[in-house]
Amino acid sequence: MKLAVFASGTGSNFEAIFSAIQRGALQAEIVLVVCDKPSAKVADSARRKGVSTFVFAAKDYPSKEAYETTIAEHLESVGADWLVLAGYMRLIGKTLLDKYPGRILNIHPSLLPKYKGKDALGQALAQGDMLLGASVHYVDETLDGGTIIKQVSFSRTEGEIRTAIEQRLHHVEHELYLAVLQELSKEAQ
Ligand code: GAR
């Protein structure tokens, strides 16, 4: 599998996938990191690891179609065959959906279909949910929509502080994404 990881922020999911590949737990290669936030930590981290990056600012392009066409050129030049969204905070448009049908994955920090969009954990906590979780799903044109592939849930404890919950959630996400990618990689062999 030749993965292109799309991210906008810290990139802990990118790092987890990268290290799984390094230690031989996943038969794949990250051929590109696509990042829409020039100052994002993930862009630096990818460069330091020697991973090719395409970093852009959407405001420099006239439309989604225009920047996705440029992204598609970069993807083609490195031979990416799976797009792995890991904290990429933009809707994928028709240009990429048409080029990679059934080959775009996303991870979301909630038990979808609950709490789509931004700060899903905050939304769950505001509702008083004790059962939290994360989902990996195929991407369609809707926000955090598309067929769910796998979900993992965990319970928070009464009074557990948000930073501790976030840490656990990230850990759950890293394991979940790896499990899905391992399954897909086996199917691809
Ligand atoms: C992750 O929790 C991911 O599920 C979330 O952004 C975070 C990125 O963390 N994605 C979404 O909310 C998508 N709607 P990371 O940059 O440390 O991987």
Image (spheres, grey):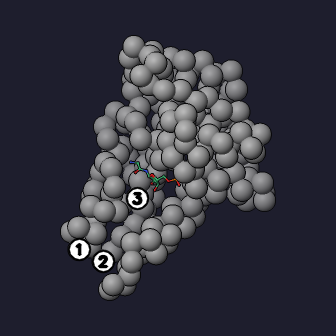
Disc 3 within 8 angstroms of ligand 1 (CB): yes
Question: Distance between the Cα atoms at labels 2 and 3?
Answer: 14 Å
Task: Give the residue at x 48% y 26%.
Answer: 57
Task: Determine whether label 2 and label 1 are within 8 Å by CB.
Answer: yes
Badge 3 amino acid: Pro
Q: Quadrant of the N terminus?
A: top right
Residue 118: tell me if it is visible.
Answer: yes
> Would you call the spot at circle 2 few (<14 residues within 10 Å), some (14-19), or many (20 or more)?
few
Q: In which image quadrant can residue 152 be found?
A: bottom left
Q: Which residue is mark 3?
A: 109
Task: Give the residue at x 32% y 41%.
Answer: 143
Which label number is shown at residue 130?
2
Q: Which residue is mark 1?
A: 128
The numbered mark, 2 or 3, whose residue comes first in the sequence reads 3
Front position in the image: 68 or 29 = 68
Residue 83: tell me if it is visible.
Answer: no
> Would you call the spot at circle 3 few (<14 residues within 10 Å), some (14-19), or many (20 or more)?
many
Badge 2 amino acid: Met
Disc 2 within 8 angstroms of ligand 1 (CB): no
Question: Of helix, strand and loop, which one carries label 3?
Answer: loop
Question: Seen from this angle, which residue lies furthest front?
Answer: 39
Task: Give the residue at x 78% y 59%.
Answer: 23
